[in-house]
Image (cartoon, rainbow, N blue to C red):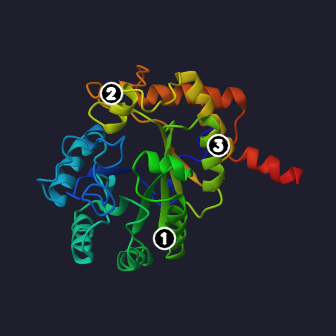
């Protein structure tokens, strides 16, 4: 366990004996709030170019993307095992047969030992969940990562998310009940939100049967609707310094159940696309600062929840 909180590396070591690396895949999916089913234009903050590596290209097959990813990582760790990370857009948004074909293609690649599937809480059919449950029962590492973003419904409407907090709760509970590990993705600093909202979301997540959570700062990205809204003065977002955001992360840790592994606290978009915040730090540099703050403050995951429970 990383000092102060249960990190993703610890979580993976609970499932695998050796090193395991995620390989991102772009399988060519869309989203229901892009194609008109739920809305158009997508989430106002979203630009998938900010997190797809070069080998992650929908013109290549799933197997080809995985092979290129393996080649990239195997130079340093030849004995590495891999998790196929269906990352771009909504990776359960398609026909059941097509989804199963893609997942099976990934699992057929030598060295791939499991799946991580990024999706929306309103895009998990019973048939797809039953299939994923069957994988988990076979012993295949299977984690569904839901884009939750916040527990505030007014914020979800502002960012054109197209689903509610209640739908996130329902999807997480259904998935966990099916025996499939479940994660949540959260963004700190969405329009209209402050540090207290991040704490509220952490406390709400702590009530759910989650295996993992990701937190990262809101990034204003060129070409997104949110960037245009902020530039025009229609919306405002918090412009936290590194020190202020680290304090938010510490509070998030204190208010999150220790049963949930925290995968990350920050994200780094390409410099040519990023508007703000421009902290000038690599992810590992931010992590080092956070670790120092955790040690200095004697921060323990879930301590605020435990203190509150002991006082009642």
Q: Residue at x 31, y 44 (%)?
A: 77
Q: Determine whether 231 is above or below 95 in the image.
A: above
- What residue is disc 2 on? 274
Is 176 displayed left or right of 275 in the figure?
Answer: right
Work out how far the residue at label 3 is from the one at label 2, CA to CA, in angstroms: 26 Å
Percent coordinates x, y for residue 89 in the rendering: 30, 54
**Of label 3 and label 2, which has the lower sequence position?**
3
Percent from the top left, x then y, of residue 1? 60, 45
Q: Tell me the SS state at disc 1.
A: helix
Residue under pointer 3 = 199
Q: Mark 2 Cα within 10 Å, few/some/many (few <14, many 20+)? A: some
Q: Quarter-wise, where is residue 2 in the image?
A: top right
Dots 3 and 2: beta carbons under 8 Å?
Answer: no
**Which residue is most to the right?**
311
Residue topped by disc 1: 175
How many angstroms separate mark 1 from mark 3 (CA)? 24 Å
Q: Where's the C terminus, which quadrant?
A: bottom right
Question: Camera-side residue: 207 or 46?
Answer: 46
């Amino acid at each position: 366990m990383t000092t102060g909180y249960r990190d993703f590396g610890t979580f993976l070591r609970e499932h695998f004996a050796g090193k395991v690396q995620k390989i991102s895949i772009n399988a060519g999916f869309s989203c229901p709030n892009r194609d008109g089913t739920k809305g158009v234009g997508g989430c106002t903050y979203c630009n998938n170019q900010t997190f797809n590596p070069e080998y992650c290209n929908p013109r290549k097959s799933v197997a080809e993307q995985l092979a290129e990813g393996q080649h990239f990582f195997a130079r340093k760790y030849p004995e590495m095992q891999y998790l196929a990370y269906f990352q771009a857009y909504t990776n359960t948004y398609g026909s059941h047969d097509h989804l199963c074909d893609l997942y099976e293609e990934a699992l057929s690649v030598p060295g791939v030992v499991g799946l991580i599937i990024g999706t929306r809480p309103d895009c998990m059919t019973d048939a797809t969940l039953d299939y994923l449950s069957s994988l988990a029962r076979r012993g295949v590492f299977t984690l569904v990562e839901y884009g939750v973003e916040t527990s505030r419904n007014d914020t979800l409407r502002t960012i054109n998310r197209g689903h509610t907090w209640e739908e996130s709760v329902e999807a997480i509970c259904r998935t966990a009940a099916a025996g499939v590990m479940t994660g949540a993705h959260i963004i700190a600093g969405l329009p209209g939100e402050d540090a207290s909202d991040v704490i509220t979301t952490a406390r709400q997540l702590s009530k759910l049967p989650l295996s993992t959570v990701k937190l990262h700062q809101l990034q204003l990205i060129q070409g997104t609707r949110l960037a245009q809204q902020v530039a025009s003065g229609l919306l405002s977002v918090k412009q936290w310094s590194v020190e202020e955001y680290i304090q938010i992360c510490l509070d998030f840790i204190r208010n999150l159940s220790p049963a949930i592994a925290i995968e990350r606290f920050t994200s780094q978009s390409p410099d040519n696309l990023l508007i703000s915040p421009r902290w000038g730090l690599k992810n590992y540099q931010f992590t080092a600062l956070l670790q120092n703050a955790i040690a200095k403050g004697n921060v323990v995951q879930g301590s605020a929840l435990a203190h509150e429970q002991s006082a009642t």
